[in-house]
Image (tube, rainbow, N blue to C red):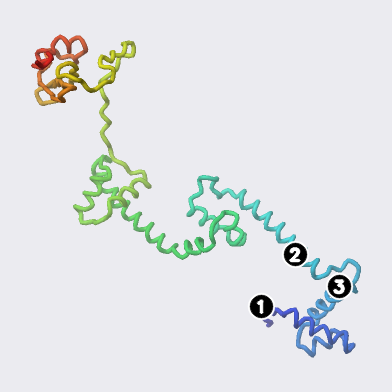
Amino acid sequence: MGSKYTKRYTEEFKRDAIAPVDSSGKTVTAVARELGISSESLRCWYRRAKADRGEGESGELTSAEREELKRLRKEAREQQQTIEILKSDGLPREGERPVSELYRLIHAEKATYPIVLLCRVLKVARSSYYAWCKGEAARRARQAADDALAHEITVPHIASRKTYGVPRIHAELRRLGRRVNRKRVARVMRERDIHGVTRRRRRSSTRPDLKAKPAPDLIGRVFHAGRPGTRPVGDITYLPTAEGRLYLACRLDLATRQARSSVTRWPTTTAPNSSSTLSTWPTAGVDWSPAA
């Protein structure tokens, strides 16, 4: 049984092997037997040498022409393979190409296309792909660990009637003796669409009157005064308590920067408006008269 590997000869050896055929007049078969090489190989080398010297048969290509033809065929083949790769169903669209998906595509298509071509078309470094292949075992182990953690998360999540979120699930796992990072719990729950019940955000009950005219700017955006008591400003807000809302009225003198405030209970159950605020303002105990 012959060897499955083809022996390669240098160009210098080929020239030295051809020389006895022209100089000694021996046949190609005899020279090949003396050199211990295949007669077909020697005959091919001799025919190509004659074509390079212009002594070959009509239509015989020279070595340079054969190399150029080989290069053009390689380019055409790579272009065709590039088109097939770009038309592949498993190729993510531009802008939605995570590197891991490209690595998986290269791994799946490497039996059909050369890895060098796949990496060049997908714009991926070969060294990065080979590093990804070496980490396949670690990724499988990590995926198995995440699946086991997801099962542990599902138990308290179902027991809470699917109301527990990341904080409570993490606390429950720690209570059971399972020490795990909270961010990892959040990632595993997010990847498997496990989520708890959250309270709705509280909406403000204040609704501006779109038909009302804007309040006039009585101080003209000038927040300083030359004499005390000439330019006071104020505001009112409410404080929620167990006994109901208490309203806080505040007065600030822009000259002295001294503030006065008072807390009062609104006499009505409805929210205050501008007219009721002004009418009941003295009951808040705020002195609006200019300072002496």
Tell me whether the residue at label 2 lies in contact with that at label 1, contact meaning CB atoms closer than 8 angstroms: no
Q: At x 25% / y 49%, what residue is drawn?
A: 170
Quadrant in the picture for the C terminus? top left
**Which residue corresponds to mark 3?**
51
Query: What element does badge 3 sit on?
Result: helix
Considering every residue shown, the one lying at the far front of the view is 226
Instruction: Tell me if residue 208 comes above or below residue 184 in the rendering.
Output: above
**Which is more foreground, mark 1 or mark 3?**
3
* Mark 2 residue type: Lys
What x and y, as percent, mark residue 2?
69, 82
Tell me the quarter of the picture where residue 13 sits.
bottom right
Quadrant in the picture for the N terminus? bottom right
Q: At x 75% / y 64%, what residue is drawn?
A: 70
Instruction: Tell me if residue 39 comes above or below residue 86 in the rendering.
Output: below
Q: Say the numbered circle drawn on residue 5.
A: 1
What x and y, as percent, mark residue 58?
91, 68
What x and y, as percent, mark residue 271?
19, 15
Q: At x 86% / y 72%, what residue is drawn?
A: 51
Q: Nearer the viewer, residue 62 or 27?
A: 62
Q: Nearer the viewer, residue 4 or 242?
A: 242
Spatial separation of the CA atoms under disc 2 and disc 1: 22 Å
* Label 2 CA crowd tier, 10 Å (few <14, some 14–19, many 20+): few
Looking at the image, residue 51 sits to the left or right of residue 160; the answer is: right
* Mark 3 residue type: Ala
**Which residue corresponds to mark 2?**
70
- Who comes first in sequence, dot 2 or dot 3? 3
